[in-house]
Image (tube, helix red, strand yellow):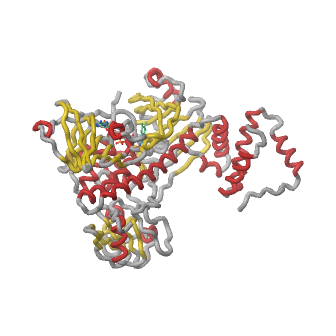
Amino acid sequence: MFQTYSYPEYAYVPSAEQVEGRTMRHPVVIIGAGPVGLTAALDLAARGVPCVVIDDNNTVSVGSRAVCYAKRPLEIWDRLGLADRFIDKGISWKVGKVFFGDRQVYQFDLLPEGGHKCPAFINLQQYYLEEWMVEAIAAHPRIDLRWKHKLISLRQEGDHAILTVETPDGIFAMEADWVIACDGANSDTRRMVGAEFTGQFFQDRFLIADIVMKADFPTERWFWFDPPFHRNQSALLHKQADDVWRLDFQLGWDTDPTEEKRPEKVIPRVKAMLGDDVEFELEWASVYQFACRRIGQFRHGRVLFAGDSAHQVSPFGARGANTGVQDIDNLAWKLALVLKGQAPESLIDSYHDERAFAADDNLLNSTRSTDFITPKSAASRRFRDAVLDLAGVADFAKPLVNSGRLSAPTPYANSALNTADAGEWAGRMSPGTVCADAPVTVRGKPDWLIRHLGQGFTLLSFGDAETVTANGVTALPLMVGRDLDDAEGLVAARYDGKPGTCYLIRPDQHVAARWRSFDPAAIAGALARACGAEGAL
Amino acid sequence: MQLNLSPNIADPDGFYEYLVDSQREMGDEAANRMNARLILILANHVGDARVLREAIRLAATSGGRPD
Ligand SMILES: Cc1cc2nc3c(=O)[nH]c(=O)nc-3n(C[C@H](O)[C@H](O)[C@H](O)COP(=O)(O)OP(=O)(O)OC[C@H]3O[C@@H](n4cnc5c(N)ncnc54)[C@H](O)[C@@H]3O)c2cc1C
């Protein structure tokens, strides 16, 4: 197995604090070096916060897990200098086909809106993502990534946590001002703080198989409902990098997971799907069961939950890693401000408010897709089949077909960090929304708007603007026409920019507030509010 | 828009006959499947979310005997 990828094995290095037996206090310790923990380390380091990452293992994600990464996480990774490599290696696809029985009932072309640096999404094996983040971390002096370090217990004092960690050299203690628990769906940390993790379990199993196939299949996503080769269940075919294809077979509940993942069982299923004459090799097969659940509170004292440890979704719509990375986007700048003493600790509570809201939105989308793909009663199966039958003959039914919806960021519409609009605004950039990208030129060279946002707070202005400061936090002006040119007019179009229009943009590239003219006092108020200032709220 | 609950079908007996006739040759399952398609087609024709919710509520609660 595994002809296309060989797993790196990272060295265990004993830490000075364990060897010398002195307990150290770290500003941030991250538990888990999955995609979310690794992104957390890079984002914190980029914002000037040193951190330690511990992982109980010594390699990247084994086997077939995440495949699809949507535009928003790619933009976050772009801010961290990683996205170009992911996009180059990843597969972009636009056409999706939906089959019902032996007929194609529906074909869609994503036709993503032009004028964005990052594609609507890419397909790439999770191990590449992790390996390249580990490489970036190795080059980063502020990050201390430690393999074969397992968190075995955690206790909290008022302003820090005490972690007991096990390594091949035994057990030692670490202290942390803040802990970010990125230790996945079976989070040990979650158990240690006694947090609830509730939701819906789906009584269904899925076979995930990755195969290497050189055949001339089109780079499209094919989804089957009730196909002749796999009656009464669903199936999916998707391309990844290196001629690896992801196959996904719904198995139903009454199947034996150990039996189903044996090559003797898997290979005939693959042949039935692709035809007898297609040559392929099986790289990996496993059987999964899915759940949709989330933690009650993302914050437990000094312990913050992010990624799968905070929420678990079904993979329809590719949401797990995609949302987890956005948790970090939201958390890292807040933690950096609090650690620098530039924002009250209560700013961290807005992390729960904003990301629990987003998690609920994701869970809703993922549950809806799951209910469509795996109907729970004869009546809902009938409606599902009715939609698919009609999709082949009438346009109206096509939008009802739900084989997984593309993951899109959830606007923090009701966040206390927002300052409400005054006046009339057109377009989508209301407070709480993630900034739309647009092509620009900088000193005559083509560039992207999004690359100029996110270092700190930004004042994107369509007129004169100056630096504004509130409680030691500054917002730096980015003037259209001076710092960058709106060559295609898309910045003005997407932001409803008129002469004088001014946006306050958060470090995570979300709109905090906007005005029709540069008003330093109003901006300072909104800036203080976006940093969680008590008085401003 | 409001859900129209006053008589709106010009030829009630003719419509009813047409509806029942359309399923005369079908077994229960085929008729159930057709009903599901019919609901979706009509729902799309109505479109308005409030009206649809009101109709669904009325249909769900007007069964007369406990199902
Ligand atoms: C079949 C399948 C398909 C998927 N497809 C997609 C997709 O297309 N797109 C997408 O976005 N997501 C997808 N996902 C979800 C995605 O894989 C997860 O959401 C993602 O891996 C979560 O990242 P994480 O960093 O939160 O946790 P994990 O990746 O689970 O990482 C947790 C890490 O913590 C470590 N750890 C655990 N306990 C301890 C401890 N006590 N001490 C120290 N370290 C510890 C583990 O070793 C691990 O390295 C898919 C998942 C599956 C199963």
- Determine which quarter of the picture holds residue A239: top left
Residue at 47 percent of width and 32 percent of height: A289
The single residue placed furthest to the left in the displayed view is: A20
Compared with A367, A229 (above or below) is: above
The single residue placed furthest to the front in the displayed view is: A158
Compared with A417, A128 (above or below) is: above
Ligand 1 picture quarter = top left
- Specify whether A181 is left or right of A70: left
- Counting from the top left corner in percent of width and height, residue A218 is at 48, 41
- Specify whether A40 is left or right of A102: left
Instruction: Examine the rendering and report whether any part of residue A111 can be seen.
Output: yes
- Determine which quarter of the picture holds residue A246: top left
Q: Nearer the viewer, residue B5 or A263?
A: B5
Q: Nearer the viewer, residue A134 or B49?
A: B49
Count of marks overlaid on the render: 0
- Counting from the top left corner in percent of width and height, residue A300 is at 34, 47
Which quadrant is home to the N terminus of chain A? Answer: top left
Compared with A398, A229 (above or below) is: above
Which quadrant is home to the C terminus of chain A? Answer: bottom left
- Determine which quarter of the picture holds residue A419: bottom left
Q: Nearer the viewer, residue A412 or A315?
A: A412
- Counting from the top left corner in percent of width and height, residue A21 is at 12, 37
- Counting from the top left corner in percent of width and height, residue A536 is at 36, 68
- Specify whether A270 is left or right of A330: right
- Specify whether B61 is left or right of A474: right
Instruction: Examine the rendering and report whether any part of residue A115 can be seen.
Output: no
Residue at 39 percent of width and 38 percent of height: A185
Residue at 30 percent of width and 45 percent of height: A37
